[in-house]
Structure formats: C-alpha cells, structure tokens
Amino acid sequence: MPNASSATRPSGPTPARVLRIGGLLALAAVVLLFPSLAPDPFILSVGVVILSYAVLATSWNLVGGFTGYISLGHAAYSGLGGYATALLILRSGLNPWLALLVGALIVALIAIPVGIASLRVRGASFVIVSIALVLILQLTFQSWHTFTGGSGGLRVPRPFGPDVLRPEQHERFFYLHAVLLALALLTWWLIERSRLGAGLKAIREDEDKAQALGVPTFAYKLIALVTSAFFTALGGGLYALWFGYLDPIFQFSILVGTYMVLMSLLGGVRSLFGPLLGAVVVGYAVEVFKSQYGDTQFHLVATGILLGLVVLFMPDGVIPAITSFLNRRRRAASIREVTAEELARQREEAAR
Amino acid sequence: MTGALFAQCLVLGILLGGLYALLAAGLTLYFGVMRVVMIAHSAFLILAAYLAWYFHERTGIDPLLSLVVTVPLFFVVGYGMQRFLVSRLRPISLTTMSVLLTFAVALTIEGLLGFVWTGTQRRVQLGYSGMSIEVAGVSIAVVKLIAFGLAAVSLGALYLILRRTSFGRALRATTQHPEAARLVGIDTDRVAGLGFGLGLATAAVGGTALALDYTIYPSLHWHWIGPLMAIIVVGGLGSIPGAAIAALLLGVAASLLQVPLGTTWAQTVFYLALFVTLMIRPQGFFGGRLAQRF
C-alpha cells in the first residue's frame, strides 16, 4: 500500500508493519485452513473457483494495473492456456504439469505479436484488439472441429488417478491454485519495486513524459503484457485440469474477461491485494447468483450495472476509496503516492 | 467460382457493406467528438431491431415505420448518454474508461433484452420477406435492397448535415481541434452531445434494417461490434469516408470469401485486416492526423 511508512522505511517494527505482516499471516492461515473448515465439497469447489478468479484478476493486473491499459479480452489468454494444456496432454501425451507450463509459455509467445500490434499506439487500439482477440478465438475454436473438438467441447484428462476422490481433488486443486496465486502476487510485488515497475507506473500516469524521460515505453508495455498473459494462461490451464472440460463458449467468453476487469477495478488496480479482494467479492457474488437464480440473463444486467457504477464513481477501486476517506478523516501523510491527475486537481484547488 | 456466383457475392457484399458503412459512421462520430470507443453501439443496434420486431408483432404494421419512434428516441438517449454518463469520466483516462462504461451499457442492454424477450431467436415475417428481384442473372432479396437503401439515404443525410449545416461545421471543428473550436465560440459540450445523438440514431436506422433481414437474439451484438471496430481501425479512427470505404471493401471481401471458406471463417477477414493494419499502418489507411495518437 502506498503510504508514508513504505516510503521512509524505518528499521524497527512500526505498528503499520506489524499490522501488515499480521494481515498477511492471517490471510495465509485462512487460505491454508479453508479446505478443512469447508462444511462440504460444494463450498470447497466454490473456494477453488474464487481462487481461480483471484489468480486471473491478479494476472490481469500485471498489465492493467501497472500500465493503465485496460484489456477486456484476457479470457483469450486463459482460454488459450486451458486449450494448450489439454491439447498438449491429448495430442502429444505430455505430463499434465509439464503441459501446463509449456502451454503457458506458448500463450506467452502468442501474446508477443498481439502486443506488437496493439501497443504501438495508445489506449483505444489496445482495447479493440483485446476484444477482437476473444471474438476471433471463440469463432475459430468453435468451428475447428478436427483440432479443438469444436463447439462440442473438449474433455481434459484428470492429472490425478481415479483413486483420488472428488473432495480430495478439490482440496489438492485448492492448494495448487493458492500456490499459483502466491506466485502471481510475488511477481507483482517484485515488479512493483523494480525499475521496470517504476517505468510502467510512469507510463500509466503520463506516457508522453515517461517517453521523454527515456523510459522504453513500448518494450516495457510488451514485457508487462507477456508476463500477464503467461500467468493468465497458467490460471486458465490449472482451472482446465481441475474442471476437466472445455467449452469454447465459456473459455473465450467476453464475460470472463469482464469479471477480471471488474474484480481488479473494484479491489483497486494500484494495490497488491486489490484484485484478490475484488475476486473474493465478485466471485462469491457470481457463485451465489448462479446457485440462487440459475444461469439467467439477469447476471449480465447485474455485472453491467456494477461495472458501470465502479467506472463512474470509484475508478480507483474500493481500497483507495476507503483509504482516501480515512486519510481525509485523520491528518494525511506527508509523502504520498499520488496520480498525475490527483496532483493536478490538488494544485487547481490550491490555486483557487 | 463461376462468374454468376461471383457477381452474386459481389452484390451481396456491397449491400452488406452499406449497412456496415452506416454503423461504422456512427462509431466514427463518437470517436471524433469525444475520443470514445462506443462498444454499446451494436447493442443499441440490436435493441432497435428488437423494437422494430416488437412493434411489428404487436401492431402488424411494417417494421420500417418504427423508425419514426426509434430514431428520435435514440437521438435523445445518445445525447443523454454523453451528457450524463460519458462526460462524467475523468478526461485523462477518458478513452479507456469510456470503453469500460459503454461496455457495461452493452452488457446491461443484452441482459435486459434477454430478460424481457427471452433468448429465443426472433424474426420478422413480412409479405415481401421472401421476394427477390433479378437483375442480369443476379437475384437480390428485396429486404436486403431496402436495408441498403435505408443505409445509403441515412449516410447521405449524415453527409449533408456534416457538410452543409452550421451544426455540421461546428461538429467537424470539434472533431478536429476542440480547444480551437471553443475559442471561436462553439459550445463543444453541446456539440459532443448532439454528435452522440446522431451516432446513436444511425444505430436506430441500422437496427430497423437489420430486423428486416436477420434472425435476431440478444447476444447477436458481439457479432457486429467486432467487425465494426475492425472497420473503424482499418479506415483510420475518426474518418467517416475512411470508415465507409473500409466497410465496403471488407464487406465485399467477407462476402466473396464465404463461398470457399464458409460463413464462420469468412468473418475472420475482419480481424485479420485489423491485425495487419495495426502491424503495418497503425493510424489506419484513410485516417488523418487525428488517428495518429490512438
């Protein structure tokens, strides 16, 4: 979290630091204990779904949060990850875990030309390409019967033998997803405090100025996109191994990409745990909605309205909205990380 | 491919391209006045098609007459959408946030359509639905001809508004340089709102034309927005003539490719064109200075 204490970094254990480490430990404990606390396999499977969403949203945030380039089509990478994993197992008999990794690497390679095409120019083209990518992949994977199984779908072989029963499957995949989530979070954290991260955030605040200061904007954006695609593909592949079935309609669904954006925005794209928080809230809401009302059109309306409200009223997410509210209450810290537009607004107000 | 088949596909492609051109002109208007990529354009298109279908279903009157209601209605909705939703977004992140906002609107419309009229496929049945006229060995369905006629007339009207009226001049000035336009006394906010209204009115016309000839269902708009976005990028964001040319070219290409490849694969020509354009000429083939930065 951007605040004064992280900027000055005192050596002793400050309250903020203790709080943060305590929170991290509590989070880890909740994740580790969840499978044994879950009353039945269904709740556990909901837990797996939410963790999967958290992986996807955190991966999305590697490009969306750092650069401010919003991708609405990240379902393309998760879907491709799922299909790549499944096809590598089915067609070349690869070990499932190796297939997962190789599949994600292939998807990262695919992301390179996509990035080259869409990142040379600013915002609008990037979003257009991201949506177009999902639409074209859905089209191709539905029609290419001989290779992808077409609209009939594709069965993914289970990585664990038949002696592993369903509840235990859920438990194992829950932990696997948790490990992947930890890796994605660690990557975000490492990038955030690197030179690359500083460059990416500069792009987000003002790309022209970043370029003028010598940030290799295009290369940095491309690195962010490819890293994000890699983790998204891992998330999609792991989910495919757990779920055991791929349907192009759901794999390359605009809605899945929307969920990633909504989760990240809601939780806050600037914070490490924002997408995770968003995934828990939105993922839980989606699952409850589905089990209560079935797959009606109404979840589209709910998603649409929620996304619209977030974009209109708290584009920086819930965490920043609450923090800024709290900061207004107590005396604001002396050094803060502010966005270029916040700064402009503050100056405007000061000038008045 | 035989000559007759080629001619047939060519004509169908031009007819379809006309509709694409009108809708792409609408998208270009939004982008011009506000630098907004309006994802909900095709959702409004399907909404208008549903309104035309519902109007015909309840009254039995020709769905074309629903234009009298839908065009002014959409104009007002478009104006309101710009004034009350899009203009609330922060200017610095307007382009990306407006995509999200209009995307949210698209999802909401799709969901509401499914909620009100269910996901069942709908089709308008008219006395002249099956009729076609034959010109030099090429048979053309009457409904396609009407759709093309509607699109051509509306595009013509749009051209006249933009070129011959003082509002059109103000709108073009706003597109080219908003600050300079404000300096010479143009109320750019109002003009942007009206530009949005005009853009959405094209969706109303397009939707009625669509209802005549297509089977409609709520999620159909995704099949339209992809090609339309490809068209405006190929044509150069912000250029109406560019969009029209790209629409006709790509419409004809898709129609011709349908014969050897089938409908689904022929659709990929739009995305291929989008990708190739961004690779070799990111500002589009017909766009001016405006497209450079986007």
Image (spheres, rainbow, N blue to C red):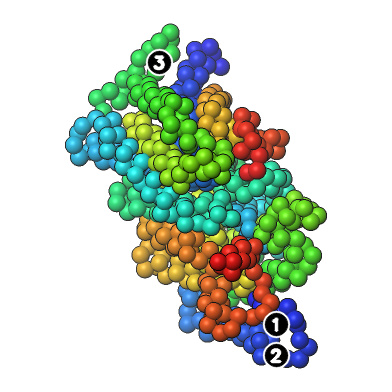
Point out the image quarter for the N terminus of chain A. Answer: bottom right
Name of the residue lying farthest toward the top: B136
Query: Which residue lies under the disc numbered 3?
Result: B139
Hey, what amino acid is under mark 2?
A: Thr
- Disc 1 to disc 2: CB gap under 8 Å: yes
Residue A223: image location, x then y, percent: 75, 56
Hey, what amino acid is under mark 3?
A: Ser
Question: Which residue is at 31% across, 20% downward?
Answer: B131
Hey, what amino acid is under mark 1?
A: Ser
Left or right position of B274 against B43? right
Image: B17 above or below B66? above
Left or right position of B265 against A183? left
Point out the image quarter for the C terminus of chain A. Answer: bottom right
Query: Which residue lies under the disc numbered 2?
Result: A14
Residue A129: image location, x then y, percent: 61, 45
Graded by Cα atoms within 10 Å as few (under 14), some (14 to 19) or many (20 or more), the crowding at tag 3 reads: some
Question: Which residue is at 70% across, 45% downward?
Answer: A120
Residue A309: image location, x then y, percent: 44, 62
Looking at the image, is mark 2 or mark 3 nearer the viewer? 2
- Disc 2 to disc 3: CB gap under 8 Å: no
Query: Which residue lies under the disc numbered 1?
Result: A5
